[in-house]
Image (cartoon, coloured by chain):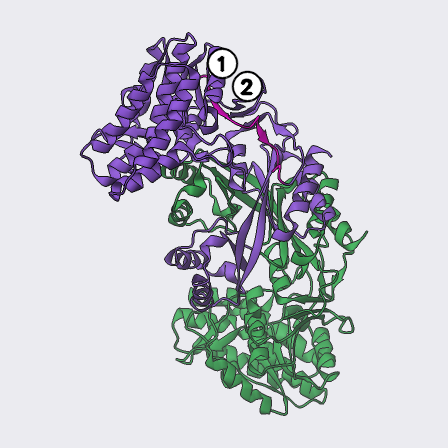
Chain colours: A green, B purple
Amino acid sequence: MKVVKFGGSSVASATQIQKVGGIIKSDPERKIVVVSAPGKRNNNDIKITDMLIDLGHAYLQNKTYKDYLDKIMKRFEEIIQELNIPLSVLEDIEHSINNVLSRNLSDEIKFDAIKALGEDSSAKIVSEYLKHIGLEANYINPKDAGIMVSNELGEARILSESFSNLYALRERSDILVIPGFFGYTKEGNLATFPRGGSDITGSIVAAGVKAALYENFTDVDSVFSVNPNIVDNPKEITKLTYKEMRELSYAGFSVFHDEALIPAFNEKIPVAIKNTNNPQSPGTKIVAEKESLENCVVGIASDTGFSSIYISKYLMNRELGFGRKLFSILEDEMISFEHAPSGIDDMSIIIRDDQLTPEKEPIILKRIKEELQADTVSIHRDLAIIMVVGEGMNSTIGIAQKATSALKEANVNIEMINQGSSEVSMMFGIQAEGIDRAIQSLYDAYFGK
Amino acid sequence: MKVVKFGGSSVASATQIQKVGGIIKSDPERKIVVVSAPGKRNNNDIKITDMLIDLGHAYLQNKTYKDYLDKIMKRFEEIIQELNIPLSVLEDIEHSINNVLSRNLSDEIKFDAIKALGEDSSAKIVSEYLKHIGLEANYINPKDAGIMVSNELGEARILSESFSNLYALRERSDILVIPGFFGYTKEGNLATFPRGGSDITGSIVAAGVKAALYENFTDVDSVFSVNPNIVDNPKEITKLTYKEMRELSYAGFSVFHDEALIPAFNEKIPVAIKNTNNPQSPGTKIVAEKESLENCVVGIASDTGFSSIYISKYLMNRELGFGRKLFSILEDEMISFEHAPSGIDDMSIIIRDDQLTPEKEPIILKRIKEELQADTVSIHRDLAIIMVVGEGMNSTIGIAQKATSALKEANVNIEMINQGSSEVSMMFGIQAEGIDRAIQSLYDAYFGK
């Protein structure tokens, strides 16, 4: 059986939901459907969830919220009318909203419950539409599905008993439509996952029912091998591993909220990224392991906005505890760092720029200089990080040569190379100004012009 | 003024000491001479210091030590007779030895004092010989020179007051000959530096008198740019910086005991490595800073005997404190590591093989796997480390490309690259079996065939 998740743009309008229906109908293995709240229909549109958040704020501040509620209901009404499904769904949605607003709940719990109404309503509409096109389908509330979560509102984590609860859903012969984004605490309160949490629900359900495939439908055909804003018409990735996806998502790839994949990863459930608007396209498959490691570079990711703190001290590597003292200073100053490559007598701390505020910078430099008696402490700004990603690259002769040659050809100086810590990627640090020509040149080297 | 230090082979025989005399006489700036104990005259010879250690052991175990003493005295006698200097020097040496043996000292203190007799006697002989060839020269004991050290016998560290004591020696018009290897504690006891400690004395004296140059005479013309056991007739290095020397010495270059240089480094005293047997050769100069950073690669060092522990865990980089927990396990198990490059979801710990005993290996793997719940923990053995060293390389486009191309040409897979942590070097990790062809190919790339 397959678990199929549809993102906000896939359920944003009646036309989109009709596509969803077609997709479900075309494959009887698609037994469980997880849906987001209706997203934007165009660039100027507002997501239902954002409207619900406005409504929630207004409600909790005792301001009038009727305008928000009207807009939300109007949007649902349009969808329902266009889909030609019973208006009772709209009544059901309105009833649920009013029920949440009128219940005696703490502000925090109520706010979280309001936020989740978009997904809940979306699931009701989709299940009704599936019935409408002749499928045996039913809405199922996450509570009834057994999705139990921790008490952290807006940051809920799945509780392990959920997985065995969900496994029982395999017995059902009908198609189940589950709203994404939330679960229920042991006390019976609704609690939402972090934003983007419908991906989390999909992944949890796929893991729970031990799905043969977790299909994640969005509005792109597949994952690109490189940022299409830098390289024209880049190659699509047809298959990549979890690890590769992780390395790519670190530096600028944002197809997926990568933590969302943990439950699926733990059960080694393959994931397919597909396009609701072009379901025939093969999409991108994320798997636990690849059979072949040929053509091993799958993608090149990049991100700007990094700095490095360079520290040198003669005989540093003989000084016991130098690293630990340095990390304590960083921890004291609440700096979390990305990497800390060390030379013999020097160390660089790679951090994201936002970690190093103008107030913190002089304090940190002073503390390192004085407390560690460093010979040199300096900050290098405007770094960009490039990740060349592919399992198997660490055993392929000449992979590094290809990258360094491409960067030389692009006239880009390499400030930093980190290979070998990861078996899946090679990291380069360069000056941010050279990023576009570096990426283009690397792309040409690995994927051909 | 110059401080000149002569190693064991430079004072191993009368012929060698005559060369030392010629070197001192040729330059009136050479005002302070530091000497080692007589070393080996040929491969089958025994160093005086090793004989003294045997004598010390025998003496302290109440065994007969007369044979050792006879051999030592015979060696000194030969030198003195050949140099044609007064036999009173020999009497003086014998008197000093008997004095140390008969004094009421603890075993540890006595042993340290015995070990130092080689340098002490050597200084007496050399000063007498300098007088003999018409120079105004005098032996000066480290106590009188003001070399004060900590109480750690055999591991003594210099006390800071020594430097101002030594500065007073600038007033002396005569040439001073100081035995290397030892100083005196505040209690007045002799204490030796770690082995190779005559280099330390030389460096301390050069720093104390603020010498214009610290000349270190050994039996090689200069430092080679690469291991001459791997590459035939490699280029000599004429000038390198302290930092470059440090990076080279890390991986197999053993010209110098690098800690010895700290005092000279602190005072930015330039150091010259020269050959007693070929003093006309320009030698190698070690300086604080280079004027030009052209042809920036100065040398390529390599060493085998490394292993890496590879640890991967999905979402490692989001896990607060992962690194710290890992380092605590290593600390618990008394593993000191060289580098710990980190990827997104993985980390490699590079260690010298001797750190990872067969007993420790399974314990460490188990602890990392269980306590950190790592997905993978594995050990990769037989790694070799290559350091390509040169200040300025981090701002030279194409330096990495040259290295990676050379390694590809040598058909060597790069397991690990670490560049950017150090502004002075680029580190490569490869399988040890490929080290010779890797080094030859890198040498050809940077220094031409």
Nearer the camera: disc 1 or disc 2: 1
Residue B228 is situated, as x and y percent measured from the top left of the image, at 62, 36
Kindly identify which numbered label has been placed on residue B158. Answer: none
Residue at the far left in the pictured view = B104
Q: Which residue is mark 1?
A: B22
Is A67 or A180 nearer to us in this picture? A180
Is the C-beta separation of discs 1 and 2 under 8 Å?
yes
| Residue depicted at x 58% and y 22% | B291
Residue A71 is situated, as x and y percent measured from the top left of the image, at 59, 69
Q: Name which residue type carries label 2.
A: Pro
Give left or right: position of A172 versus A318. Answer: right
The magenta segment = B212-229
Q: Secondary structure at mark 1?
A: helix
Give left or right: position of B78 versus A410. Answer: left
The count of marks equals 2
- Residue A410 seen in the figure: no
Label 1 marks which chain's residue?
A: B
Mark 2: few/some/many CA within 10 Å (<14, 14-19, 20+): some
Rounded to the nearest angstrom, the CA distance separating label 1 from label 2 is 9 Å
- Residue A366 seen in the figure: yes
In reply to whether residue A177 is colored magenta, the answer given is no
Quarter occupied by the N terminus of chain B:
top left
Q: Which residue is mark 2?
A: B279
Among the 4 quarters of the image, the one containing residue A6: bottom right
In reply to whether residue B223 is colored magenta, the answer given is yes
Quarter occupied by the C terminus of chain B:
top right
Same subunit: marks 1 and 2: yes
